[in-house]
Amino acid sequence: MSKYSFSRLNPINFLQTFVTQSLELSQQCRPDNDDEQINKIEKLGLSAGACFESVYREERGLIGLLDQAQYRDLIVEIKNQIGGCFSPASSESGTVRVINTRCPFGEAVKHAPELCRMTSSVFGGIAAHNFGYAKVVLNKRIAVGDGMCDVCVHTDPNEAGQYPGGDEYRKKGEVIVGKAASADVSARVEKQLSKVWFDIKSNPADKPRVVAQSTSMRQVLESVEIIAPTTANVLITGETGVGKEVIARAVHAMSERWNNKFLAINCGAIPENLVESVLFGHERGAFTGAYEVHQGYFERANNSTLFLDEIDSLPLLSQARLLRVLQENEFERVGGRQSLVANVRVIAAASSQFDKLVAQGDFRRDLYYRLSVVPIYIPPLRERPEDISPLAVSILARLSEKYRKKPNKLGSRALEQLISYDWPGNVRELENILERSFLFASGEVLEQVALPRKLGKAKSILTSISAHDAPYTLKEAKKKAADEVEKAMLEELLAYSRGNIKEVAQSLQITPRAVHQKLTQHQIDPNAFRHFP
């Protein structure tokens, strides 16, 4: 296909427009209606795909439906004409697979992962037009740090079901209809969560909202739908703050036990000598202070779901008794002689390092296998940046309802801050930071967020003096490093004291005047630190 043909379509301008529009959509659309955003992006991609296919056919004089080889060549050429480095990869019958090592938008795509949804709808729309059906699965993406793109387009609806995730497209008459799996499964899970935990008397700010635009989170929710109706035990792993309890509640809400009370307990918060009493209960007189019969969590969770958070902190002796309960569905209260039967669905949660504890012998391997009949891993937020923007919009809307304050829109600078930050505390940290920023925001647009400042930055100052900065004398290198450390310390103290010069002076044991001189030297404006806690 000639460059002249594509210049008529001006694809680069089109794609740049898409990035801008998709970012605007992610901020403007209501968080409780992700379908609105997805539908608009999808329509944009479907229109572009039809346009690209039309030019391809015109250039080659093609009539009739494309075969899979022609389709593969078309989607590769589309991407490569706009700066990609796509190539065909080996695939099974009924599947077209392509890989890519260079994104047309370079590093910028990591700040706009929504671009990948347009790629899905372009590829899926063209495939559905020619084969009647397509399911596009983005196995790997440069946008989320995979280092390459790996795209599979499945054209056989009977075989596509075995591949998790992805977006589906069907041809109905002359119209291509898309079905974004993320919106569909998110809506179903959110609806059931609301049914179980939300009623008209509840605070609207407490209404559960499920955001899953990334492929990894879509796969988590799809797993929830599949396993929820069963009685299988579930083990959820992931870093702190990723939302393990939310997923546990979703499993319960989607199960047949949804109308019974969901019980949750943090195993790490129970004193070691009380673990068995808390879990299994105790009889009167079982120990000093046991004046009455106490029903434990297993007894209270009969015919329902019990969530054991931080299961990896459970003592070894208690692990043995828990194993027996899971094996036989029977237990005894502490100090009791009667066996009690419990019909309990157990969902456990642990850190992402759980497998290492098992390997080291700090957690019973047989209990691990009993708990992890169905393992679910929730990836950290830094590995799914496409979820950050819609999560932020949803959180800001919830804060607006909570504080009865006009909602803020995310400015471009704030969005860039959110996407570039590492999020060691994951979604919980995102919620806390946005709440602080929301409370101190003065206008309708949130121009920046109150990200934590770390003195750890100063530790890497010397490594920033690279070879291309030479020639450096030792004296000059020391001065440069000292200046950078001093600047980092001033910024940290200003952030901690909310811009209070007197407090900074006291911390450094110098006069306020000396602080002002240093701020002038480093071109630091203390007013910039007075808006955030």
Image (cartoon, rainbow, N blue to C red):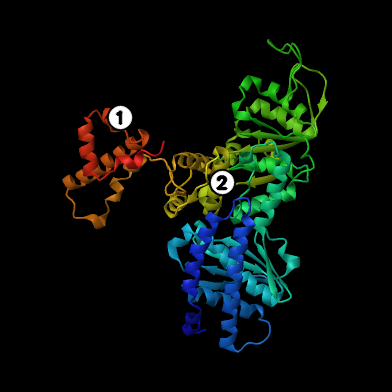
Where on the picture, by quarter, is residue 230? top right
Mark number displayed over residue 285: none
| Left or right of 433, for residue 253 | right
Q: Residue at x 55, y 75 (%)?
A: 76
Q: Is residue 184 left or right of residue 242?
A: right
**Mark 2 lies on residue:** 397
The spot of residue 24 in percent (x, y) is 51, 59
Which structural element holds mark 1?
helix
Which residue is disc 1 drawn over? 503
Task: Please name which of the two marks, 1 or 2, marks the residue nearer to the observer.
Answer: 2
Which is nearer the N-term, disc 1 or disc 2?
2
x, y percentage for residue 468? 25, 58
Residue positioned 51% across, 79% down in the render: 9
Q: CA distance from mark 1 to mark 2?
A: 35 Å
Q: Residue at x 60, y 46 (%)?
A: 378
* Element assignment for label 2: helix
Tag 2: residue type?
Ala
Query: Residue 483 occupies which quadrant of the picture?
Result: top left
Residue 361, image x, y percentages: 60, 34
Looking at the rendered structure, the kind of residue marked 1 is Glu
* Residue sitting at x 52%, y 68%: 100
Find residue 273 and report its horizontal and vertical position in percent. 63, 19
Q: Residues within 10 Å of mark 2 (few under 14, many from 20)?
A: many
Asked if residue 113 can be seen in this view, the reply is: no
63, above or below 13, in the image: below
